């Protein structure tokens, strides 16, 4: 029954996110917002609405590990799994200029969060700084979006400016109903998913942090996964990448910021977050830099590498949570063979790109 309620909550949450994104996108178009800005802000942030609903509910009910686990885990899932999977469908060529700015911003946001977590708590001042960051990023995205190339503008025009009926008051009213309905479903689904995740963590004997980093993070990232896969198949690869990177920024600055503001006593941070989880997320973000610089694309080979790392990362979390006998050998192989080999490869790629 717990697993059934978890999947039911996830389905309701994703359905609510779909209604929210659809209504907000059409409403934005109806009041004159450009398709590029809709794609960079409304859609990118709307696909993160499951994480937002879950995190706010977790903040109000004192489940800090699920807040941090879900949003950090979503970064790892978005970059390693979604980009990896999409690049297997078709190599992802980066033409959108904003992405070149977004990746350093994404890295910076995670570094700021790491510094804030060092004292073991995100208080309201920290949360306010994070929330101010998402406002600044949104304004920056709108500003840079106006300077994009004609090809990118056309790509977003095709994706986010579908033929719509006459935009009268009735049409705008329908979009507002979609937005409100989507929010209601998001809240309802978040309640069911959160309660099920807490029960499942207790039954399996693992922490809420691990459940958040794995199952909940992957589940709430379904909208980003669906959006990026569809965009890749349609050849709109800038949208596939922009959606992932933009969502990672919003997860850290927007969602953790809002959750920290509404949490009565702030967000408590487990020691493992600063020792392992956040550094892994930062490493995943940094791995995007040389890939985006080397020919501005994510190749199929790099996609396989991303998926392999996600599998290794998830395996480590599961083994560590159960104190598995194979954990020491697995950690030894990762630390002294896989990680150094990857670092050398990244340095070589970056050196060639700079030359």
Image (cartoon, rainbow, N blue to C red):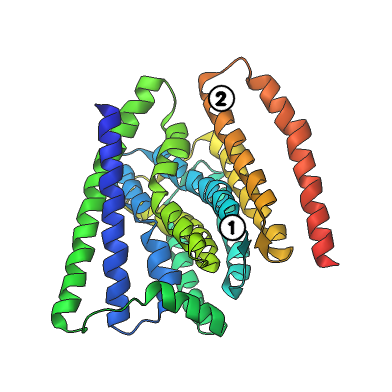
Under tag 2, what secondary structure? helix
Give percent across and percent down for residue 255. 40, 55
Give percent across and percent down for residue 306. 63, 46
Q: Visible in this render: residue 115?
A: no
Along the viewing direction, whichever of 149 and 214 lies nearer the viewer: 149
Farthest-out residue, right: 355
Q: In the picture, residue 257 is in which quadrant?
A: bottom left
Farthest-out residue, top: 325
Q: Residues within 10 Å of mark 2 (few under 14, many from 20)?
A: some
> From the image, which quarter does the C terminus lie in?
bottom right
Under tag 1, what secondary structure? loop
Along the viewing direction, whichever of 127 and 92 lies nearer the viewer: 92
Q: Residues within 10 Å of mark 1 (few under 14, many from 20)?
A: some
Give percent across and percent down for residue 92. 60, 61
Q: Residue at x 74, y 39 (%)?
A: 339
CB contact under 8 Å: marks 1 and 2? no
- In the rendered image, the vertical position of residue 10 relative to residue 238, given as above or below: above
Instruction: Describe residue 97's horizontal placement relative to residue 179 as left or right.
Output: right
Q: Look at discs 1 and 2 and give the one toward the viewer.
A: 1
- In the rendered image, the vertical position of residue 318 relative to residue 12, given as above or below: above
Along the viewing direction, whichever of 29 and 277 lies nearer the viewer: 29
As measured in the structure, the alpha-carbon distance from the residue carrying label 1 to the one carrying label 2 is 34 Å
Give percent across and percent down for residue 89. 56, 54
- In the rendered image, the vertical position of residue 328 relative to residue 248, given as above or below: above
Q: Which residue matches tag 1?
A: 90
Q: Residue at x 71, y 32 (%)?
A: 334
> From the image, which quarter does the N terminus lie in?
top left
Of the numbered discs 1 and 2, the one sitting upstream in the chain is: 1
Number of numbered discs visible in the structure rendering? 2
Q: Which residue matches tag 2?
A: 320
Q: Which mark is residue 252?
A: none
């Amino acid at each position: 029954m717990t697993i059934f309620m978890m999947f039911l909550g996830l389905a309701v949450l994703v359905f609510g996110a779909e209604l929210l994104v659809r209504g907000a996108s059409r409403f934005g178009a109806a009041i004159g917002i450009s398709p590029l800005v809709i794609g960079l802000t409304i859609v990118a942030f709307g696909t993160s609405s499951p994480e937002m609903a879950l995190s706010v509910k977790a903040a109000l009910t004192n489940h800090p590990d699920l807040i941090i686990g879900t949003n950090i885990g979503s970064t790892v899932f978005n970059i390693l799994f979604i980009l990896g999977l999409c690049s297997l469908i078709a190599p992802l060529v980066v033409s959108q200029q904003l992405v070149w700015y977004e990746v350093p911003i994404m890295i910076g946001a995670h570094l700021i969060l790491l510094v804030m977590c060092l004292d073991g708590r995100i208080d309201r001042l920290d949360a306010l700084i994070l929330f101010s960051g998402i406002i600044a990023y949104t304004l920056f995205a709108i500003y840079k979006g106006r300077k994009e190339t004609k090809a990118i503008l056309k790509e977003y025009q095709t994706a986010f400016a579908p033929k719509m009926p006459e935009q009268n008051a009735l049409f705008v009213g329908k979009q507002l109903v979609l937005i409100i309905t989507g929010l209601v479903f998001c809240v309802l689904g978040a309640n069911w998913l959160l309660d099920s995740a807490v029960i499942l963590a207790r039954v399996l004997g693992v922490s809420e942090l691990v459940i958040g980093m794995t199952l909940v993070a992957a589940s709430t990232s379904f909208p980003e996964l669906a959006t990026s896969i569809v965009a890749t198949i349609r050849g709109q690869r800038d949208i596939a990448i922009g959606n992932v990177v933009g969502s990672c920024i919003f997860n850290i600055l927007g969602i953790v910021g809002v959750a920290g503001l509404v949490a009565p006593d702030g967000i408590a941070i487990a020691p493992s977050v600063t020792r392992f989880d956040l550094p892994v997320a930062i490493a995943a973000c940094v791995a995007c830099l040389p890939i985006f610089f080397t020919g501005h694309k994510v190749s199929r080979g790099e996609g396989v590498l991303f998926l392999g790392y996600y599998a290794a990362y998830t395996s480590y979390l599961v083994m560590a949570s159960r104190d598995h006998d194979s954990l020491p050998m697995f950690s030894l192989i990762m630390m002294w063979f896989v990680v150094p080999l990857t670092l050398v490869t990244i340095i070589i790629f970056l050196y060639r790109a700079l030359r």
